[in-house]
Image (spheres, rainbow, N blue to C red):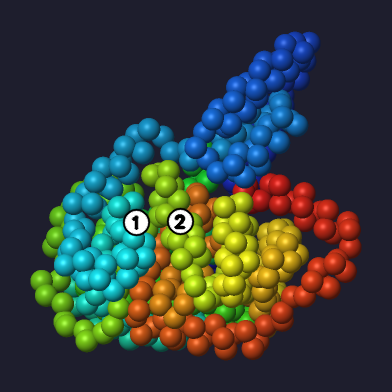
Amino acid sequence: MNILFKKSVQRIILLAISFLIQIAIIIFCLLQYSENFFNFYIASLALSIVIVFIITNSKSNPSYKIAWIIPVMIFPVFGGLLYILYGGNKLSTREKLKMAMQNIKMTHSLKQDYKIMNKLEEESIYAKNQSEYILNYAKCPVYNNTETTYFKIGEEKFEALLKELKKAKKFIFLEYFIIQEGKMFNSILEILEEKAKQGVDVRLIYDDVGCIITLPYNYQKRLEDKGIRCRVFNQVKPFFTRRLNNRDHRKIVVIDGDVGFTGGINLADEYINEYEKHGYWKDAAIMLKGDAVWNLTIMFLSMWDYIDNREENYIKFKPSKHKYYNTNGYVQPFDDSPLINEPIGETVYLNLINKAKDYVYINTPYLIIDNEMATALKIASKSGVDIKIVTPYIPDKKFVHAVTKSYYESFIKDGIEIYEFTPGFMHAKTFVVDDEYAVVGSINLDFRSLYLHYECGVWLYKTDSINDIKIDYLDTLKKCHKVTMEECKNTSAIRKFGRLIIRMFAPLL
């Protein structure tokens, strides 16, 4: 067991002990006033009723509401308290205001060239409408002078990333949910350290929960000692907190404002199949070169300023002039935040499904969706659209995979084809539609990605890379097992019932 892993385990143990001590104190206090337990119970019940009223009238997704109402009413003593601590978007008013100010600054930094939008409208009113939705709510413009390169596995993205990092002259920005030292990150770290010595502005953001097992506490100080500026998103504190729900799940790299990467691939060795964690790891990423990289640059800087409590001039990071790329199509990188009460990622996916004419091909590690998404997929299938969904055969989370399987029978009944990636774990988050549209990003088909996490993706229309995404999808199907109705019906009644019970609480997983 290496030193980094030992320190990670130690931190988790200390956090667990801290939480247990707090629970013990609460129980002790209750026992001290056991003679007044009836009054306490009535007060707790009243609180739970108020909480249920608040949940019912909130703007949350109905499935998320139900998932909270059930435990609150079954366990009235602690249910209301749990919701106060962990229910929904629980950033403080000060933090929301701070993020709102960052969003305003982001809006001022990103300006749509309406010549591009008008040209898009001439090609397709549907594409223009989808693009305009992203512009209006994510504040991210659409571009056409951008080269896109699709990577069908982590190994390809890793090779390209190393190559582009070595070319950096001005700045390197990285933002990841999971980082772990090993072949992948150590190779990147070596370049980052060298570039920092050369005077390149190197910055890195990682999520504390995502790295709680993979990195030791205060790992950012090690990076700072190497000349790499580092910030940690939403650090875990050793006491009950309301902020655990909102995580930075984005994967972003920006190099000199000219080159950008995003997708599902984190910086750990399983993502490049350096070692087998859940069988063969299938993932996807996309590299951008050109004007659209500016969106990724602003996403990173907005998050950096939010964590750092500072403001800087974003414009100094914008290239004075981009190379002209003789490419086809339109590219629109976008982000999704839990603070704006608008499910941008889900709506982008729904728009693709609802406008599809021929097919919708989806890769997703998790299939934990609300009624709106399930209904849209079923209606599209019933209308003659070829809907195919690839999920993992070997899961990373068994309970979550059980929920994924709970959708199979009803989907297959309505003509949706379900495949499981038999070599191992499907971690890619991609949509490809009608040879015209695609999305590659970090957004899973689960409640956390769609409602609680900070996410990002790239919406593509008629780019050359869309064909690459489709080819990769069809090649992947050859390595998959098609789930049949007979298999679903042969599943034991007990297992089916268990999956449905877990599915009731799926929004909380």
Question: 10 Å neighbourhood of mark 1: few (<14), some, or many (≥20)?
Answer: some
Q: Residue visible at 66% across and 34% down?
A: 69
Identified by mark 1, the residue type is Tyr
Residue 473 pos. (x, y %): 54, 82
**Cβ atoms at labels 2 and 1 below 8 Å apart:** yes
Residue 214 horizontal side relative to residue 496, left or right: left
Q: Nearer the viewer, residue 119 or 103?
A: 119
Please tell me the numbered disc located at residue 347: 2
Q: Residue at x 22, y 71 (%)?
A: 119
Q: Residue 327: which numbered mark, if any?
A: none
What residue is at 89 percent from the left and 63 percent from the top? 492
Q: On the image, which quarter does residue 212 sit in?
A: bottom right
Q: Position of residue 151 (x, y in %)?
A: 44, 83
Q: In the image, what residue occupies the spot 53% across and 76% down?
A: 359
Q: Name the residue carrying label 1.
A: 133
In the picture, the quarter occupied by the N terminus is: bottom right
Q: Is residue 482 above or below residue 408?
A: below
Residue 237 located left or right of residue 465: right
